[in-house]
Amino acid sequence: MNISGNTVFIPGATSGIGLALALRLQAAGNTVVIGGRRAEVLAQLATEHGFATVRIDTADPESIRAAATQVLAEHPDLNVLIAMAGIMRVEDWRSDGFLADAEEIVTTNLLGPIRLIAAFTAHLQSRPDATIVTVSSGLAHTPLRVTPTYNATKAAIHMLSESIRLQFAGTSVSVLELVPPAVATELLPGQSESPFAMPLDAFVDETMALIEAQPDAHEILVENVKLLRFGEVRGDYAETVATVNRLDPHGNA
Ligand SMILES: NC(=O)c1ccc[n+]([C@@H]2O[C@H](COP(=O)([O-])OP(=O)(O)OC[C@H]3O[C@@H](n4cnc5c(N)ncnc54)[C@H](OP(=O)(O)O)[C@@H]3O)[C@@H](O)[C@H]2O)c1
């Protein structure tokens, strides 16, 4: 993905990583359309930063279809989709009551990106140079004990990215997977205060530098995520799992 000159849609950019990346991409010379459920936040961000905005609930297939129609009508040169929207919940599979959360996490974190990508594939293939950006996590590779379904959806996003990259080979569409480590956002309550979370600005700075330096990369891996990403490759997976769960027993990730 080129660092500038794109028209980018980021559903999931009303806060956290999505918003920080939207601001950096806009500053780097891209047209950025942001999306999310909170209409009042979208309106405020449009006023403050000049973003184009689209209201979208990525847990709702009809909302995805309507938002895609709107985005493509208003921005026919759109060439980058960043499937950012996601949720994280702490679950305890030893007691009752986790199933509703588990289903919601799958709907938002896995079905959401699948439906989003499906809504844009025909259009993206019609552009000369397009990119689908998926957002997984270091937890796709090293599980955090307290967030089983979240970890599983991110592992699925990793393998989906690997798989559709094979299918889009030979087309104009590239697939880029962002693999964040723990970053200081409000993905989980209190996470922005966690000493284990990477500061948001540092994360997006490093991410932008990597995108610029490696326009053909398959994955964007900041240094902080390599511990989780490569445990199995290094041969110290069990130790990595133990370390991550010992360091951060309350679930910040
Ligand atoms: N922070 C981390 O440590 C970390 C680590 C690895 C991966 N990630 C991934 O990075 C992505 C962004 O997370 P974040 O940390 O920036 O969290 P965040 O600050 O909570 O942001 C989540 C964003 O997703 C949007 N969103 C959630 N559910 C949505 C839905 N149903 N429809 C539309 N938008 C929805 C939210 O917007 P509205 O509330 O306005 O809808 C918000 O803009 C997620 O996919 C997350 O899994 C984060």
Image (tube, helix red, strand yellow):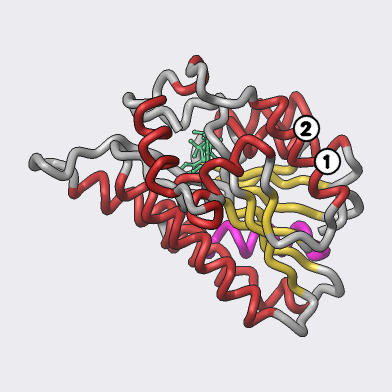
Count the numbered circles shown.
Answer: 2
Quarter of the picture holding the N terminus: bottom right
Residue 71 among those drawn in magenta = yes
Q: Which residue is depicted at the point 74% across and 77% down? A: 125
Q: Position of residue 138 (x, y in %)?
A: 52, 45
Cβ atoms under marks 1 and 2 closer than 8 Å: yes
Q: Dot 1 surroundings within 10 Å: few (below 14), some, or many (20 or more)?
A: few
Q: Which residue is depicted at the point 58% across and 31% down? A: 15
Q: Which residue is depicted at the point 29% across and 35% down? A: 90
Residue type at mark 1: give it. Ala
Question: Farthest residue in the left direction?
Answer: 96
- Residue 17, quarter of the rendered image: top right
Q: Is residue 21 above or below residue 31?
A: above
Given residues 82 and 60, the one toward you in this image is 82
| Residue 217 falls left or right of residue 93 | right
What's the distance in space between the residues labelled 1 and 2, CA to CA?
6 Å
- Residue 156, quarter of the rendered image: bottom left
Quarter of the picture holding the C terminus: top left
Q: Position of residue 157 (x, y in %)?
A: 50, 60
Residue type at mark 2: give it. Asp
Reading the image, the residue beneath label 2 is: 205
The rendered magenta stretch, by its main secondary structure, is classed as: helix
Q: Is mark 1 within 8 Å of ligand 1?
A: no
Q: Is residue 217 above or below residue 243?
A: below
Q: Which residues are magenta?
A: 65-78
Q: Position of residue 11 (x, y in %)?
A: 59, 48
Q: Position of residue 198 (x, y in %)?
A: 60, 26
Reading the image, the residue beneath label 1 is: 209
Tag 1 secondary structure: helix
Tag 2 secondary structure: helix
Given residues 130 and 42, the one toward you in this image is 130
